Image: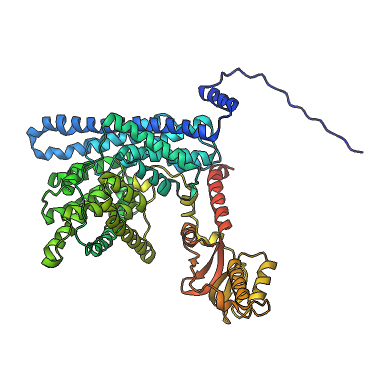
């Protein structure tokens, strides 16, 4: 006999709550059921239009701060002496420090926290306004940073506000962030193509899908059109006409690319070092970590002010000095070298201390100094028969893109940005050569010396849409690697190997020699390709005599168990691999286990879920 138990719940009377404006709009859109194309156009209009207006306001705010401090206030204090210039960055640091103290969530919270759940979490509409004010004050009072970081974040904030208003999914949310980033950079530099590629190359990365292109393109175009309408149709700065004078120059641009990779690596590591100093993680600078974070911008402003007493050229965005170098104004080589070093130090201190800005403009400043030095040295040392080359400003332009590409890991964005600024096709080929060599050199430094590049937040963009990748940087391979795996002897026949892999439903197998040392890797595709090729050549199906030793891939990419999972993911993505063997550091042929793609995805979900549950588990 079975008994059915009926349960009921008592409904409590609830106070009537009128629907909000966003609820009404969402309900209306649901009733209308617009197509995805209509939604993309509507989103592009809102994001592009809002971003364009925000960037225009941002630029006017920077100019207003510069006028109030360096003209009005400095004019009053100049009677005390030129040393009073140092007080302007300190004043900016005080304002930014107050904003960081008063609004810690708006200037300190990473967007990765907003993407840790499957739905959009709320942010305050006041956040972009605080970011705009902090960035305008920082740049307007001399912080050695650029406007592109805040511009990208302002555009992304608009995408976030739109996403949270309509309660979109996380994938759609990321797309709106990418569209906002493209719109912000497009309006900031008057370079819509570069803005699109920045969003696809840096912000979205592997999360990019083809349907996203229309929304990102439209957002960038609309934002750039609004900026051009209100600010005028002109690039960020005027550049001279470039000409190729000799075919020998391709060799020289390769040399410039190598030097740019060195400068890029030093630049990124200096930023990370100074950030670690202000966090108290470097020996001798623990006292900085003990200071209230609101005082860090004041310390940074004081350092910038001291440097500016001798080199005022490093103050602010630096477009004026940059344009002078690119237009061929004569700068002594010694001054260019000092400016390169001083700008690098000033930018690292500005960003590390908590002043608000980006790294694009300083990277271009460093590249212009490097290229001008390089071009002048070529003219001085080359024999007369080889001295028919482009003038130093041309090398300054190419160096600008090469250092930028190496610093922010965005070669396509850098090439297209400079192409849009110069509007000269002749510069593209030398540009591609130098940028390609620069990025290759940076990657070489990273692989040989365990040097890591900058993430978006370290670039001055408080935006981490790919939260999973940031989490994987904190998880070691030992946590997620599989210690059971399919290993086949190198002497096994091709047919037997294929049968074994089919029985085990295995995509990839390790190939070991007679001493059980790693010899190579074989996949189902390798076996299928070898069988088809052998059968077509012999026209008989019983003459396949190859062994795994004949077809396995001997040049094996591997990982160490103490490395972050993110590094294994990057290696697998570079070659499209499904699996990596995990080996001992003292013997790369001794297999400890394997790491597979599905385990990496699981590791990301586990780590994010653990982080979300941690506050509740600690209290239980």
In the image, is residue 601 above or below residue 252? above
Q: Is residue 258 above or below residue 619?
A: below
- Circle count: 0
Q: Specify the quadrant of the image occupied by residue 168.
A: top right
Assign the C terminus to one quadrant of the image.
top right
Q: Residue at x 36, y 38 (%)?
A: 184
Q: Residue at horizontal 19%, vertical 36%?
A: 88
Q: Nearer the viewer, residue 10 or 312?
A: 312
* Left/right of residue 331 with respect to residue 362 in the rendered view: left
For this rendering, which residue is in front, 452 or 579? Answer: 579
Residue 163 location in percent, x, y? 49, 34
Q: Position of residue 395 (x, y in %)?
A: 21, 55
Applied colour scheme? rainbow
Outermost residue, right direction? Answer: 1
Where residue 564 appears, as percent x and y from the top left, is: 47, 59
Residue 203, how many percent across, how many down?
A: 42, 46
Q: Residue furthest front?
A: 539
Look at the image and tell me in which quarter the N terminus lies: top right
Where, by quadrant of the figure, is residue 105 drawn?
top left
| Looking at the image, residue 374 lies above or below residue 320 | below
Q: Is residue 393 visible?
A: yes
Looking at the picture, tell me which residue is in the foreground, 270 or 225.
225
Frontmost residue, 164 versus 382: 382
Q: Report whether residue 410 is seen.
A: no
């Amino acid at each position: 006999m079975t008994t059915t138990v009926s349960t009921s719940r008592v409904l409590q009377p609830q106070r009537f709550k009128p629907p909000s404006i966003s609820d009404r709009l969402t309900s209306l859109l649901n009733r209308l059921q617009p197509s995805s194309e209509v939604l993309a156009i509507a989103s592009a209009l809102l994001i592009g239009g809002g971003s364009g207006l925000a960037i225009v306001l941002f630029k006017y705010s920077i100019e207003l701060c510069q006028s109030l401090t360096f003209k009005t206030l400095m004019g009053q204090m100049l009677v005390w002496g030129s040393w009073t210039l140092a007080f302007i960055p300190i004043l900016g640091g005080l304002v930014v420090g107050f904003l960081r103290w008063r609004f810690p969530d708006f200037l300190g919270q990473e967007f990765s926290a907003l993407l840790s759940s499957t739905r959009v979490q709320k942010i305050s509409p006041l956040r972009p306004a605080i970011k705009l004010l902090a960035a305008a004050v920082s740049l307007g009072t001399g912080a050695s940073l650029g406007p592109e970081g805040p511009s990208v974040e302002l555009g992304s904030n608009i995408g976030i506000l739109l996403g949270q208003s309509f309660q979109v999914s996380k994938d759609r949310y990321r797309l709106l962030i990418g569209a906002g980033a493209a719109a912000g950079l497009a309006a900031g530099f008057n370079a819509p193509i570069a803005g699109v590629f920045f969003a696809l190359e840096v912000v979205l990365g592997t999360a990019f899908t083809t349907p996203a292109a229309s929304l990102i393109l439209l957002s960038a175009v609309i934002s750039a059109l609004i900026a051009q309408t209100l600010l005028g149709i002109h690039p960020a700065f005027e550049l001279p006409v470039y000409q190729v004078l000799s075919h020998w120059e391709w060799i020289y641009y390769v040399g410039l690319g190598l030097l740019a990779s060195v400068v890029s690596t030093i630049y990124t590591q200096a930023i990370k070092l100074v950030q670690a100093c202000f966090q108290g993680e470097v020996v001798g600078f623990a006292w900085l970590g003990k200071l209230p974070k609101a005082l860090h911008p004041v310390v940074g402003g004081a350092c910038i002010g001291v440097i500016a007493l001798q080199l005022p050229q490093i103050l602010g965005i630096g477009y004026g000095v940059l344009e002078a170098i690119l237009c061929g104004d004569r700068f002594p080589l010694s001054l260019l070298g000092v400016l390169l070093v001083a700008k690098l130090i000033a930018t690292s201190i500005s960003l590390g201390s908590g002043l608000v800005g980006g790294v694009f403009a300083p990277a271009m400043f460093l590249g212009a100094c490097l290229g001008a030095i390089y071009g002048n040295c070529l003219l001085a040392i080359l024999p007369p028969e080889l001295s028919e080359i482009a003038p130093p400003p041309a090398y300054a332009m190419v160096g600008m893109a090469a250092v930028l590409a190496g610093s922010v890991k965005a070669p396509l964005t850098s090439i297209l940005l400079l192409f849009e600024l110069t509007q000269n096709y002749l510069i593209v080929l030398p540009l591609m050569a130098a940028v390609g060599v620069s990025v290759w050199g940076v990657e070489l430094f990273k692989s040989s010396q365990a040097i890591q590049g900058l993430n978006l937040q370290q670039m001055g963009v408080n935006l981490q849409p790919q939260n999973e990748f940031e989490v994987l940087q904190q998880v070691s391979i030992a946590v997620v690697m599989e210690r059971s795996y399919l290993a086949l002897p190198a002497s096994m026949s091709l047919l037997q190997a294929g049968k074994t892999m089919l029985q085990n439903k295995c995509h990839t197998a390790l190939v070991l020699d007679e001493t059980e040392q790693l010899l190579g890797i074989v996949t189902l595709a390798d076996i299928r390709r070898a069988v088809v090729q052998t059968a077509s050549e012999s026209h008989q199906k019983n003459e396949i005599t190859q062994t795994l030793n004949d077809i396995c891939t001997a040049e094996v990419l591997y990982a160490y168990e103490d490395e972050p999972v993110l590094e294994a993911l990057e290696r697998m993505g570079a070659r499209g691999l499904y699996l990596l063997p995990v080996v001992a550091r003292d013997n790369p042929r001794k297999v400890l286990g394997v790491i597979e793609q599905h385990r990496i995805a699981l590791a990301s979900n586990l780590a994010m879920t653990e982080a979300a549950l941690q506050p509740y588990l600690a209290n239980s």
